[in-house]
Amino acid sequence: MDIYILWIVVILALSFDFINGFHDTANAIATSVSTRALRPRVAILMAAAMNFLGAITFTGVAKTIGSGVADPSVLDNGVEIVIAALISAIAWNLITWWFGIPSSSSHALIGSLTGAVIGGAGMGNVNGSGLLDILKALILSPILAFGVGFCIMWLLKMIFARRSPHTVNKGFRTGQIITAMFQAFSHGTNDAQKAMGIIVFALVAAGIQDTMDVPLWVKLSAATAMALGTSVGGWKIIKTMGTKIFKIEPINGFAADMSSAAIIMSATLIHLPVSTTHVITSSILGVGSAKRFSGVNWSVAGRIVVAWMITIPITILIAMGTYWLIDVIFY
């Protein structure tokens, strides 16, 4: 195995993590920025720090990503498969970022890895049960986030119904700082793990290591890439999430951040990858529905849902094509 090819994997994986940082972390701070609980630059720097901290704290999701879709130890061309998967996932992330669509980096990576395995090793090498578990988590988590967001917002409405809206929002604007930190930390615990998992997949496929344990240098480099990407900021997605779905007030932002962070952390603790984009967007939709159903811009929500639905099949096809192209050009 040419060590330079392995370094290409590492560079691509960290690039994916960097892009994930400004693509997905925008979701984590969108509500606190839109309600002016935090100034944009302060929110981004806070999110970068909390993402880094969350990324180095857990590794369970990385192990799931590294072995859930396929067994890297039985793939002779595992490194090339990873390269094709990462190129596909990065391409889709950049396309959706450019158009300001909060699509899922998680779906892009899972779809791309599945497509690359199919293209490079055949359908028989896809771990059906492991992939099914991942897909269940990706599908169920936004449904739960919508329900939890709706319930939390409904309870808050009941509790503070007789209080002045100005006083309530002033208090929750301070509370949003705490929930935004929790949101960014939870994002790091789940999303940064995905790049770690894909690097470990390549290390096992290349015979560099035998287990799915995440080396310290992988943890630190992935956490740093995520934090640096976060520091760049994803203003187009912040605008979509924070202003275009419905008019978010501090109490709504608090409810959305709390519910989505709780769902993401729960998934991390049971070692399942979820789409932070889906979870955060769904919690915002749930909160907006509890506040006033007609106040939600369902056309924007529908456009986001369409992007979710097409991400996995499109990235499967992109990754299959990318692998075949790599095979034709270099082998």
Image (cartoon, grey):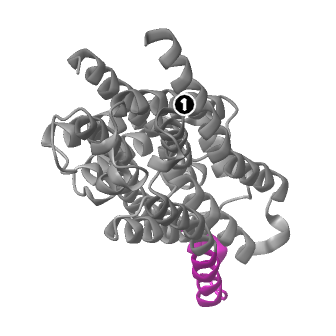
Given the image, on which type of amino acid does mark 1 rest?
Ser
Tell me residue 25's x, y (percent).
47, 45
Q: Is residue 325 above or below residue 145?
A: above
Span highlighted in magenta in the image: 147-171
Tell me residue 136's x, y (percent).
54, 67
Which residue is nearer to you in this view: 73 or 308? 73
Instruction: Name the side, left or right, on which 237 lies relative to 21.
Output: right
Residue at left 74%, top 58%?
246
Instruction: Name the side, left or right, on which 218 lies relative to 246.
Output: left
Q: Main secondary structure of the magenta part?
A: helix
Image-quadrant location for residue 99: top right
Q: Pick the quarter of the image with the N terminus.
A: top left
Residue 161 lies within the magenta run: yes
Residue 157 lies within the magenta run: yes
| Residue assigned mark 1 | 88
Examine the rendering and report whether any part of residue 93 can be seen: yes
Pointer 1 local density, CA inside 10 Å: few below 14, some 14–19, many at least 20: many
Which residue is nearer to you in this view: 84 or 167? 84
Tell me residue 205's x, y (percent).
27, 37
